[in-house]
Image (cartoon, rainbow, N blue to C red):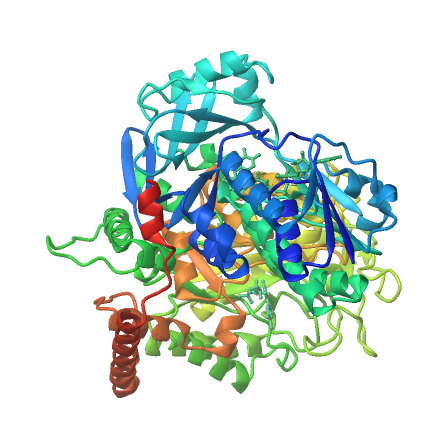
Amino acid sequence: MRVDVIGGGPAGLYFAILIKQSHPGTAVNVVERNRADDTFGFGIVLSDETLANLRRADETSYREIAANFAYWDDIYTHYRGRVLKSSGHGFSGIRRLTLLQILQRRAADLGVRVRYQTEDPGVAAHGEADLIVGVDGISSRVRETLAAHFKPTTETRSNRFVWLGAKTTLPGFTYSFRENEHGIWNLHAYMYTQGECTLVVETTDEAFKASGLGVEDEAATAAYVAKVFGEELNGAPVLTNRSFWRQFPVVRCAAWHHDNVVLLGDAAHTAHWSIGSGTKLALEDAIALHGAVTRHPRDPRAALEAYEGERRAEADRITHSANTSLVFFENVRRFWHMEPIQFNFALMSRSKQVTYENLRKRDATVIEDVDRWWARQVAEAERLRLPADFVAPPPMFSPLTLRGMTVMNRVVVSPMCQYCAEDGTPTDWHFVHYGSRAVGGAGLMFTEMTCVAPDARISPGCTGMYKPEHLAAWQRIVQFVHVHSDCRIGLQIGHSGRKGSTQLGWEEMDQPLAKGNWPIVAPSPLPYYPEVSQVPREMTRQDMDRVRDQHVAAARMGIECGFDMLELHMAHGYLLASFLSPITNRRRDEYGGSLENRLRFPLEVFDACRRIWPAAKPMSVRISATDWIPGGNTAEDAVEIARAFRALGCDLIDVSSGQTDPASRPVYGRMYQATFAEQIRNEVGIATMAVGAITTADQVNTLVASGRADLCALARPHLADPYFTLHAAAQYQAMGYALQGVAWPKQYWSGRDQLYTLERRAREEAEQKLGQVKPPKPDVAIAQRAA
Ligand SMILES: Cc1cc2nc3c(=O)[nH]c(=O)nc-3n(C[C@H](O)[C@H](O)[C@H](O)COP(=O)(O)OP(=O)(O)OC[C@H]3O[C@@H](n4cnc5c(N)ncnc54)[C@H](O)[C@@H]3O)c2cc1C
Ligand SMILES: Cc1cc2nc3c(=O)[nH]c(=O)nc-3n(C[C@H](O)[C@H](O)[C@H](O)COP(=O)(O)O)c2cc1C
């Protein structure tokens, strides 16, 4: 077999080593345009996890790598005059050149043929190879040559960054954020060997331009950075090595292999350097490809198919984290109002891979500080007195007051249609459904979208608020919730618009009814599914008056029922949402066109409801913060939308996204919409509720304490477990927390006591086990020798 590797960076060399080691008879050729000792940049970081993977893959090179790394556990964050330390992070730094030289030597020892200072002539010149590996980095020519098959896209991010060095000693990984007359400058610095550091400095494009620095002016850059971060760098001069100000390209490929050609590392996908995973990804790609080739020794095409099938999910996970992380650094200004403890926690949890509980495992004192800081903020906001020896609860179990309504914790049962109302009237199902969730411990619960008129319903099974029977049935539910729980209950009202007259949720959702359809209305006559959906009638001003008044009438009935809060549904492509979105609103009058015009009718409805809704009771609006469609609403529009509602007395924005149109292409992931809640909360200064793939108490604590949302709504988790909050409370109580902010019904106290005992025992057993089996650590002895 013959394997040709185009590019002798970390991934190319590592793959060549692995394949030559396991298949000594294979001819392995690497072509590399640089000299063996050429390198750009200074050091790279690798996590404990990556080192363990390298050890498993090739012990020989691992030992040499491990003997050369600087190992550190601590992160220091410099922010507004304070330095915060956190431990337990477990990272290693190594000079990039050292890493390459170790891999070059190992490749040579194994008999890999590496031709340095050789420009690759192109994929076509490798016709005799059985396998061609394109590992030619971020500007890959292999990828561009076969672009028709790999379908690459490159998104250039806005921040400017530069890779620099300094000869100084740092106590650990160092972040620093400094503001000057040009803007905010972020420093990421770490030692890769004793006394030598890599620095990456970044800032916004605006600040970079304001500074007057030239893209390639290395001397001016070094002087500028040395001035801004002189204190952190102990006055050491800043070193350059082709240190040009760049903008990070996020490279993605629809396919990584074609025929017998495969892309690896930066050529296939890039991961922003702020999670230090570019080299990790590249090396682990090499390990995965080697595994697939070993399993399909005679069939390279099958090996590539298997490789891509297995590797994509993991690579996507890491690149997604990297993309989430880079957004934090692009928007440091958004967090700039935060106090140091919260800022640091927001920084640590930026990629949402490191969470509240995850940080506790690394360094419990950080979480104790977060808890105490948080408790003090809440006490001040809620005018609570804290005893001197108070033990702060996890942030999830703290109260929040909106106008005259106080919720006892930050968990919310998200609105969820049950699709089983009878002529709009909630049934016994609804009574039990809402009743059991109310006693399940959440601080607040919303009703499903309750429709303001028969023709405003999504489906024949939707609840309504337009007939006396509706009022009586809802009243019974609200009364139960108030008498038997501490949960607050909000009414969500809405009009389905062009998504009305459709099937039940478990049938063909959003598709028209088989029979008995009713006429539907919308801002513009655009059917949801052009092939099958009804064409809605374009609303006249008279229709708008009617719909506004229907919302007001429903809100009045809500007052009579005793609801604690009112939410207007303006998300997911329903009527008011479709006024807001330019995808669904094509009107040419004063209700269409600019955002100001598109907001006009939704604001009018909100205002009319706010005028009759009691001043002591809060109101919220659910929005789709992005349409996930080019040309649709974006997060920036959502900020303006939130501002407009806040000005009319809206207390909370319930931040969802998408479902505007079948063309929506959401990027899912855990807590995937929280980033919009974060932006709106911190840019507009209004309380937000995050929703969407929030599934654990840990995530609720993370989002709340990091200032990304005030409340967290969970929908599907509450279908699976109405007692989500009570169960989370039991887990925290087993950890020794004394919790307020959660109330078990007295009828269930004996069950609560048993659950606490079981949780405590499970915890003790887990701790005992952990004590016996130590988690794998890298070869610290070797690392310390090097340092
Ligand atoms: C500022 C910055 C900081 C970073 N910090 C870290 C970090 O801390 N940790 C981390 O893991 N990663 C980090 N990275 C990312 C890391 O450098 C890359 O992700 C990693 O090097 C990718 O490895 P690769 O082998 O895929 O590509 P590369 O390292 O780019 O190697 C590709 C090789 O192919 C060669 N080549 C290209 N075209 C040709 C051709 N036509 N003919 C011959 N040879 C060719 C190039 O000379 C090069 O040697 C950082 C990146 C940047 C920009
Ligand atoms: C069965 C079901 C019904 C839903 N009905 C509504 C609704 O009536 N109003 C609304 O705003 N969102 C509704 N949603 C969306 C949820 O409130 C929530 O935004 C979404 O499910 C994402 O949260 P999750 O990941 O916690 O499930 C519904 C979701 C589900 C699963």
Q: Nearer the viewer, residue 349 or 138?
A: 138
Residue plotted at (46% across, 70% down): 561
Going by the picture, which residue comes out furthest to the left?
A: 388
Q: Quadrant of the N terminus?
A: bottom right
Q: Nearer the viewer, residue 370 or 529?
A: 370
Residue 677 picture location, percent across and down: 50, 49
Q: Which quadrant would residue 522 be assigned to in this image? A: bottom right
Q: Which quadrant would residue 158 be assigned to in this image? A: top right
Residue 439 picture location, percent across and down: 37, 77
**Can see residue 636?**
yes
Q: Is residue 439 left or right of residue 620?
A: left
Ligand 1 - quadrant of the structure image: top right
Q: Nearer the viewer, residue 520 or 228?
A: 228
Q: Is residue 608 above or below residue 7?
A: below
Residue plotted at (66% across, 50% down): 16
Q: Is residue 84 left or right of residue 670?
A: left
Residue 40 picture location, percent across and down: 57, 29
Residue 664 picture location, percent across and down: 72, 54
Q: Is residue 23 above or below residue 375?
A: below
Q: Quadrant of the C terminus?
A: top left
**Can see residue 643?**
no
Q: Is residue 366 above or below residue 308?
A: above
Q: Is residue 470 left or right of residue 49?
A: right
Q: Is residue 519 left or right of residue 69?
A: right
Marks counted in the figure total: 0
